[in-house]
Image (cartoon, rainbow, N blue to C red):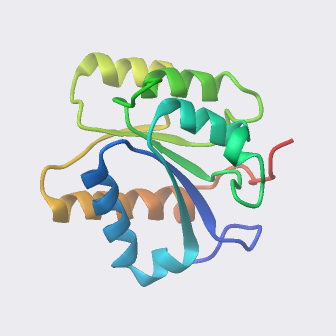
């Protein structure tokens, strides 16, 4: 496995309001030394915070503290601004639309799946109930999107 072409660890922006799910995701990274050394996870807990991060507003104004993500993992059921609204904002912004967005949610509703893809989601994954399957899915998603898929070069924001 190699780092992205810029030689820096990959950045994941995790938008998850469920503390238990955030802890499982954190555990998935801490269990895997290779991921832990090659990935930086920035967490947000509501949709407005995601947009503040991406638009570098407020506490996220410093680019060193809020680097452009290589991957956004987005829950649908976020407070203040739901995940589909966040996805729509991301994919409507010329500076952000090329960042892959994976919807990672408990919803198996076909309408949510269809709307997410229509809004530009790059993938839609349903959170497994079992912790082992959950961590496996997180690790697999990261390995695919960050180390196997060929993505546009992550130049920082314009």
Residue drawn at 25 percent across, 20 percent down? 110
How many discs appear?
0
Q: What is the residue that sits farthest to the left in this orientation?
A: 130
On the picture, is 64 further left or further right than 9?
Answer: right
Eyeballing the image, is 142 above or below 95?
below
Front in this rendered view, residue 129 or 136: 129
Q: Quadrant of residue 20?
A: bottom left
Front in this rendered view, residue 148 or 11: 11
Residue drawn at 29 percent across, 16 percent down? 111
- Quadrant in which the C terminus appears: top right
Q: Position of residue 58 (x, y in %)?
A: 71, 40
Q: Quadrant of residue 30?
A: bottom left
Residue drawn at 50 percent across, 31 percent down? 47
Q: Quadrant of residue 45?
A: top left
Eyeballing the image, is 132 above or below 34?
above
Front in this rendered view, residue 6 or 74: 74
Q: Position of residue 127 (x, y in %)?
A: 24, 45
Q: Position of residue 52 (x, y in %)?
A: 65, 36
On the picture, is 22 further left or further right than 157?
Answer: left
Q: What is the residue that sits farthest to the right in this orientation?
A: 158
Q: What is the residue that sits farthest to the front in this orientation?
A: 59
Q: Position of residue 1 (x, y in %)?
A: 55, 78
């Amino acid at each position: 496995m190699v780092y992205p072409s810029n030689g820096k660890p990959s950045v994941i922006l995790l938008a998850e309001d469920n503390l238990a799910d955030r802890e499982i995701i954190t555990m998935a990274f801490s269990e895997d030394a290779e991921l832990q050394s090659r990935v930086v996870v920035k967490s947000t807990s509501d949709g407005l915070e995601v947009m503040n991060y991406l638009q570098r507003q407020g506490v996220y104004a410093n680019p060193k503290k809020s680097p452009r993500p290589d991957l956004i993992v987005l829950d649908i059921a976020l407070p203040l601004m739901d995940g589909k609204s966040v996805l729509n904002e991301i994919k409507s912004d010329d500076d952000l639309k090329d960042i892959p967005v994976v919807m990672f949610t408990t919803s198996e509703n076909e309408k949510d799946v269809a709307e997410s893809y229509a809004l530009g989601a790059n993938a839609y994954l349903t959170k497994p109930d079992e912790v082992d399957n959950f961590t496996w899915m997180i690790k697999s998603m990261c390995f695919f999107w960050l180390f196997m898929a060929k993505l546009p070069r992550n130049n920082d924001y314009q």
